[in-house]
Image (cartoon, coloured by chain):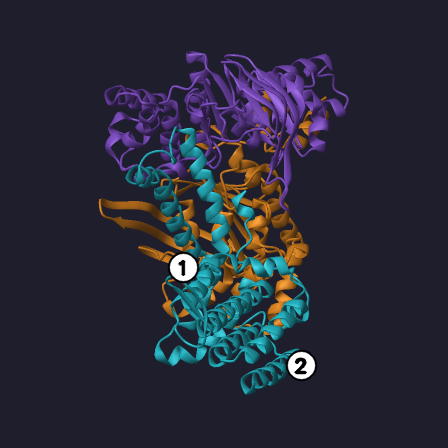
Chain colours: A purple, B orange, C cyan
Amino acid sequence: MPIQLKNVSFIYSPGTPFERQALRGVDLTIADGEFVGIIGQTGSGKSTLVQLLNGLLKPTQGTVTVGEITTTDKGVRLRPLRQSVGLVFQFAEHQLFAETVAADIAFGPLNQGVAPDEAAARVDEALLTVGLPLEMKERSPFELSGGQMRRVAIAGVLAMRPRVLILDEPAAGLDPRGRDDVLARISALHRERSITVILVSHSMEDVARLVNRLVVMHEGGILHDGSPREVFRHAENLATIGLGVPQATEVLRRLRLAGWSVPAVALTLEEARQFIVAAWRERGGGA
Amino acid sequence: MGVPSIIEIKGLHHVYRGHDGDTYALGGVDIHIDEGEFVAIIGRNGSGKSTLAKHLNAILLPTEGHVLVMGMDTQDARLLWSIRQTVGMVFQNPDNQIVATVIDEDVAFGPENLGVPTPEIAKRVDAALKQVNMLPYRNHAPHLLSGGQKQRVAIAGVLAMHPKLLVLDEATAMLDPVGRAEVIDTILALRSAAKMTTVLITHHMDEAVLAHRVIAMDEGRVVTTGTPAEVFSQPELLESLGLDVPLAAKLAKELQRSGLPLPDGILTAAQLVNALCQSN
Amino acid sequence: MLANVTLGQYFPGASVVHRLDPRTKLGMSFAYIMVLFIATSWLSYSVLGLASLLVIWLSQVPVKMVLRGLRPILMILSLTVVLHVFTSREGVELVSFWFVRIYSGGVTQGFLLAFRLVLLVLSTSVLTLTTSPIALTDAIEVALRPLRRFGVPAHELAMMMTIALRFIPTLLEEAEKIMKAQLARGADFESGGLLKRAKSLLPLLIPLFISAFRRADELAMAMEARCYRGGEGRTKYKVLKYSGLDAYAVASFVVISAVALAL
């Protein structure tokens, strides 16, 4: 399900003292099956952008088209759009409401008009996908740990079987192990089901490891758009807008400043190790 | 004796009593913290680190063992308010610790509770807001501030009570990188200006690296303690605790294994690059 | 965005009316309302009305903002007038047409009552427009203080109002977020009958309540950690102080009221 934004602007509370332009003239196309990371400071327009993609917000100017649906068309029905574009908000556990984990996860599918037994099957599938045991189904979501609640909330969106999955900071506030596990599962989901995944993140380490394409937002516009390797080449540029680069890249950047001839970007620790060992040998180290 | 201990924890056990059985949160913790120290406590969720924090100012009381704050036992109810005035706490959620509808009134909340005379409160509010660099926002409404700004206000609210110890209980966990940097810079500024004794509870290892001493906890016990260099040179141990090691430290370890002559105790990118440049 | 909603209807400014002590304003508003109820003649009302206009002019609040307070009572106003005009049988008969009989007494009565209501609403509007919610809370705490000996928890009530004011924007923002999250899961808050719609609000209300309780819990802990133990022994950062302005205001008020009641 391809996504296309044409010259999209968005203004909050137009015509009031609180008027604020969140997006200005954004053009963006995302093809089927891409894994896109969106990074940028708080207030750069990331959250507005993702809410435009499932019609929670409609552009003040320009068009947003997902598959066949353009959200600003007259008489457009947004519910089919919300079925195919799943959106996991930041701190998603705050949306849990049902008495049992199963009932909460089934909320989305049942709203879609899925039959109850089919919904039950989807609950099982979604629980397994996020790595929670099926025995958890009958428990109250409010007895679970923070990390487990987050997973239940993600499962609630997965059970709708979206073609496009958008996650806003899915790992925020989790401890390192919880974070790695949730992100690994999202990555597996993308690989196995070939759905489009859009990951909004503040962590350069995470996007460097996971995504194929990185979009950098700044003051409501797109500043960079390319593979992580291309984008992180612009370390100085990113620094001026308050964004960093992955630690592995940062080490290489400092080495280059010190006169070493290493590549500008390393996305993983292993890559950085290889580059540094090669350069060290070249400089006569260990000889 | 030498320098007096601000915190002395002896054989601390904590059990949460619940409907469906008891939860053992702390199982025998001994820690002492000296005046002027900067201690980071790390551990995964459920390791007991937040329970420990709540013992430092008698929000929780020991099931067994003792917590002494400048010699005051937290189980002595008569000392409760002196203990809470001595230990300032900043919590995780920036929204849920600001009481007043205007920033300066919130900073005044603690001194007001202590019965500080009005002219003195005004002085303290100004000084505290200046220390966290939020003086220009004194007349703002809290809900319009960023997360990092709200946490700085929370720190100011604690500083205005003139505490001896500042405890930050995962105070950066809900913030974006800019907000985290604001809070950490504020702590470092307080450290260098006032030598404020600080306990930083966090699961961000790049923050723990800044402390003098790191205490790693798991399953309600202290697993290891030492300087950041000592603690983070045990990547296998930390990973078994579900914790990260700063990437520069991990990379340094890997490079050592590949035969590069690097010293131990590298924690940051800058240290690693320095060591590499000296290695050939 | 909901978070930007201004609370109450405070219109910030630095006019003499803004600068009055909130206790003075609160007290004068009460007294004004009492005078309104004692007054009976058209002349008295004219004086009181003029006084109102003078205060509005001094407050420098746009007249449109002040008049906005009248919108919710338009219905009541028209009803008051209509009822009196058509049902009263006092005074001289003015109109007699088919079954309709209008008497002069009814007309005077109806318009007097309506005018009294308008002045009443205008005076409270001016109070809330020129006094910030926090100042008003302080004033209410002072006003309630004498009732403490009868068991009225003045400090606690004021603290509750402050916390409510503090958290309303936060909870509004949160409600908006939860609503969006449930909409994204295909929730439908709009269609269906009353019962269905009430039920469809549960996915919004339950998380909102849970969050409010969690916030309350955490806030209570944070307040305790900052040594909050009720109103006993507490000092104040911003102490209310009367100034010469308040004396002028009260003196003018007394004179105007006396004139109004004498007429």
Estimate the x, y position of residue C55 in percent, counting from the top left. 63, 71
- For marks 1 and 2, give the one nearer the viewer: 2
Q: Quadrant of the C terminus of chain A?
A: top right
Question: Which residue is labeled 2 in the image?
Answer: C244
Looking at the image, do the residues carrying marks 1 and 2 touch, with CB atoms under 8 Å apart?
no
Location of residue B55 by image quarter: bottom left
- Mark 1 is surrounded, within 10 Å at the Cα level, by few (under 14), some (14 to 19) or many (20 or more) other residues, namely many
Residue C71 seen anywhere in this rendered image of the structure: yes
Helix or strand or loop: what does disc 2 sit on?
A: helix
Q: Is C150 positioned to the left or the right of B184 in the image?
A: left
Which chain is indicated by disc 2? C
Tell me whether marks 1 and 2 sit on the same chain: no
Residue found at x 57% / y 38%? B176
Q: C107 or C176, which is in the foreground?
A: C107
Q: Residue furthest left?
A: B20
Looking at the rendered structure, the kind of residue marked 2 is: Gly
Q: Is B266 positioned to the left or the right of C103 in the image?
A: right
Location of residue B223 by image quarter: top left
Q: A21 or C84, which is in the foreground?
A: C84
Question: Which residue is labeled 1 in the image?
Answer: B58
Residue C234 seen anywhere in this rendered image of the structure: no
Looking at the rendered structure, the kind of residue marked 1 is: Ala
Estimate the x, y position of residue B46 in percent, counting from the top left. 38, 40
Which chain is indicated by disc 1? B
Q: Is A93 positioned to the left or the right of C257 in the image?
A: left
**Mark pair 1, 2: CA separation:** 48 Å
Estimate the x, y position of residue C3 in percent, counting from the top left. 53, 46
Q: A85 or A209, which is in the foreground?
A: A85
Location of residue C123 by image quarter: bottom right
Circle on res. B36: none
